[in-house]
Image (spheres, rainbow, N blue to C red):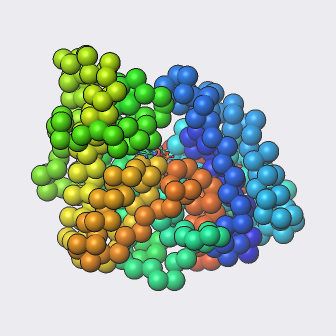
Amino acid sequence: MIVLALETSCDETSAAVIQDGLILSNVVSSQIKLHAEYGGVVPELATREHLKNVQVVAQEALQQAGIDSGQLGLAAVTQGPGLPSALMIGLKAAQGFAFRLGIPLIGIHHHEAHLYSSWIKGDPARADFRDFEPSVALIVSGGHTILVHVSALLQHRVIGGTVDDAAGECFDKVGKLLGLPYPGGPEVDRLARAGDAKKYSFPRPMLHDPSFDFSFAGLKTSVRYFLQKNPLILESREGVCDVCAGAQTAIVDVLVAKTMRAARFLNVGCVAVSGGVACNSLLRERLEEACRLDGIRLRLCEWGFSTDNAAMIGVLAEQKFIRGHPPLAMDAEIDTSWAL
Ligand code: KG4
Ligand code: ZN
């Protein structure tokens, strides 16, 4: 079966073609440059860009895959959560495709797609669920920080999440306070490599709280007050690098500690990590070390599939369709408050 998948939940217009788990193409048109000027995603601009690009990106995905639209057997789309007007563009485009081609359409939960994206591996990339085992999954991105107990493929339960800001949002805000370009996460990661993480210490919110919840708003505020008290730091590259390293280490300490505690508590043999912040080099390093020590298999989402992409939508839709998941009605709506 060949699947055409669309993803437009935030600031990436993406289309992918999947055949039996194999990713034939995964085209991502990023709007980062457009939103950088405003220091964050502007929903109206994102929507206009999705509208302009969605058909072009879908055609490009088909062309790169060497597939004619007549060969498609399934369409898939992100139905929620996300920016309402952005989601709407993808959903209406996918409904149009499915209707015109007479194929079923599966609506996918954005976070659930991130979760299973950790099972996409290799070159050429392929989703392989054959050796699936019970796992703890950390989904960590600009809009969400969620810990999930995955007892079997497509059977999962949320065990914790952020009570305020997501980890990626915290990275981005720290970047903004330091005057770094948007999005701050990759820049903080890059500059932290040249910094001393011990020079300035920032709080590790909820580290010792017995729940699997997170909180990052206080950490962000503490960086802001610190910089207000020490404005000269902003004038030295060394100082900025040290703040990046200190804040990044605080975020990563909490993410790693809670994820590993959940894995031990639930006695699972695998930890899966996905979402944009899964690109963070310190997080990857620290998880590798922690899993090695605990004898736990680590499934780190590969770079190209960590940030928003349609391949993860298509891969999950294929699995759902095989298991008899009902297709979406042609007049189905987006769902922005869909719980995982
Ligand atoms: O999954 P994603 O593309 O979009 C959402 O669904 O939010 O994640 C984007 C987030 C941004 O906050 C970005 O700063 C963060 O992922 N990010 C990083 C890194 N690369 C991307 N955060 C820390 N270190 C990175 N290397
Ligand atoms: Zn995402």
Quarter of the figure with the N terminus:
bottom right
81 sits left or right of 247 in the view: right
Q: Which of the pair 328/211 is nearer the observer?
A: 211
Percent from the top left, x then y, of residue 20? 67, 76
| Left-right relation of 189 to 209 | right
Horizontal placement of 293 versus 191: left or right? left
Residue at image coords 45%, 79%: 132
Residue 61 position, x and y percent, is: 76, 56
Q: Residue furthest bottom?
A: 131
Q: In this rendering, is residue 55 above or below 175?
A: below
Q: Quadrant of the C terminus?
A: bottom left
Pick the residue in front: 174 or 77: 174
Is residue 147 found left or right of 308 in the rendered image?
A: left
Question: From what the image shows, is residue 227 above or below residue 118?
Answer: above
Residue 268 appears in which quarter of the rendering?
Answer: bottom left
User: Which of these two is toward me, 199 or 14?
Assistant: 199
Q: Residue at x 32, y 18 (%)?
A: 235
Instruction: Let me know if residue 93 appears in the view.
Output: yes
Q: Is residue 326 above or below residue 57?
A: below
Taking the image as drawn, is residue 95 in sight? no
Quadrant in the rendering for residue 2: bottom right
Q: For the image shown, how many numbered marks are present on the structure?
A: 0
Q: Residue 158 at x, y = what percent?
A: 34, 60
Q: State the image coordinates of residue 103 (x, y, percent, origin top left).
A: 78, 65
Out of 106 and 47, give the one closest to the viewer.
Answer: 47
Residue drawn at x 38%, y 31% as measured from the top left? 175
